[in-house]
Amino acid sequence: MKTVRNTFLRLAITFVSVTTLRAQDPLPSWNDTAPKKAIIAFVEKVTKEGSSDFVLPAERIATFDNDGTLWCEKPLPVQLFFTLDRVKALAPQHPEWKTKEPFASLLKDDLKGALAGGEHAILEMMAVTHTGMTITEFEKIVAAQHPKFKRPYTECVYQPIL
């Protein structure tokens, strides 16, 4: 019983220590820069009751754009890497892609040629790589590894946002 009590006490002290450290720095994975300071100051201002800038909790929202705020974009957006990899994986089932753009260029490792069709080409590739499967099947597919980051596509997010 004493061992259980000591273990519990150690866990409680660890939890309090970690919680205290996080409370001291609400954005521990961010560098100490002007943007970090501005964000913290803004949040403190709008969450302090009595402040002229106070925002009621029910009226607070956070909006994140999918333009690099959440997902890695360099050298290409993670979703596009996924799409390009899926085209290559599905190519054996689609021999017609050898002569049909944007697939033909991509299958020859000509990324510039594959993307020459602009948004239309990207949407065409996304349509064939993101349809015709269940959610469970899709979840298994996106667990594949990103070629540059060597981790599942679903983990290619920015730590500061988490």
Image (cartoon, helix red, strand yellow):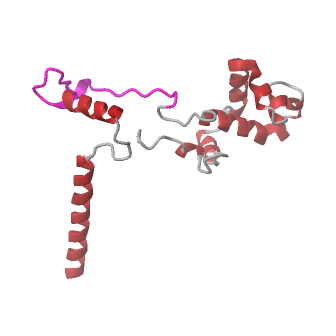
Image x and y of residue 162, in percent: 41, 42
**Figure quadrant of residue 54:** top left
Q: Which residues are magenta?
A: 46-68
> Which one is in front, 111 or 38?
38
Residue 60 visible at all: yes
Viewer-closest of 98 and 33:
33
- Residue furthest out toward the bottom: 2
Q: How many marks?
A: 0
Q: Is residue 152 above or below residue 11?
A: above
The image shows residue 2, relative to residue 8, as above or below, that is below
What residue do we see at 83% from left, 35% from top? 107
- What residue is shown at x 23% (from left), y 48% (from top)? 24
**Residue 155 within the segment the image draws in magenta:** no
Lateral position of residue 158 relative to residue 33, left or right: right
For the point 24% across and 80% down, the residue is 3
Magenta stretch holds residue 57: yes
Residue at coordinates 72% horizontally, 40% vertically from top-left?
85
